[in-house]
Amino acid sequence: MKFFLPYAENDQELAEKQYLYFKEAYAKDHSGSRIYSLKFIKEGREYIAQVGDFMMGGGKVLAIFSQPKEAFYRVLKLVRVKDDGDFECDIAMIGSPIKETTYFDE
């Protein structure tokens, strides 16, 4: 899967800028490859968080970041696009067990 961000699918330069902004603002400790999706277990049920799709509890997934020092993932979800075009976001913390991680192509 080629890297993209929702709302910037047709503008790779904008997607790169947004991704770096999200990383700096929400996940400074993220290292490694860009994550496309996570398959995880919560309360005995299997869920998937995937960039571009809506996640349980609402919100379109904008980006997924690993947090190696804290042993969990941050899933950045869009709450709404403000009138000035900026994003209002929420973060879902996903811990173990992670069943599968899919990465964007390098």
Image: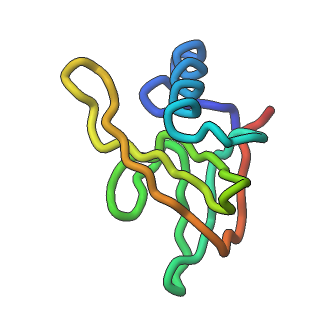
* 93 versus 47 height, above or below: above
Residue 2 lies, in percent from the top left, at 69, 32
Residue 34 vs residue 66, the one in the foreground: 66
Residue depicted at x 27% and y 38%: 80
Residue depicted at x 46% and y 57%: 92
Q: How many labels does the image show?
A: 0
Residue 9 vs residue 90, the one in the foreground: 90
Residue depicted at x 29% and y 20%: 85
Residue 29 vs residue 1, the one in the foreground: 29
* 13 versus 50 height, above or below: above
* 19 versus 13 height, above or below: below
Q: Quadrant of residue 58?
A: bottom left
Residue 55 lies, in percent from the top left, at 42, 57
Residue 53 lies, in percent from the top left, at 46, 49
Q: Quadrant of residue 12?
A: top right
Q: Which residue lies furthest to the bottom in this view?
A: 44
Residue depicted at x 46% and y 33%: 6
* The N terminus - image quarter: top right
Residue 40 lies, in percent from the top left, at 61, 70
Left or right of 22 in this view: 105: right
Residue 43 vs residue 25, the one in the foreground: 25
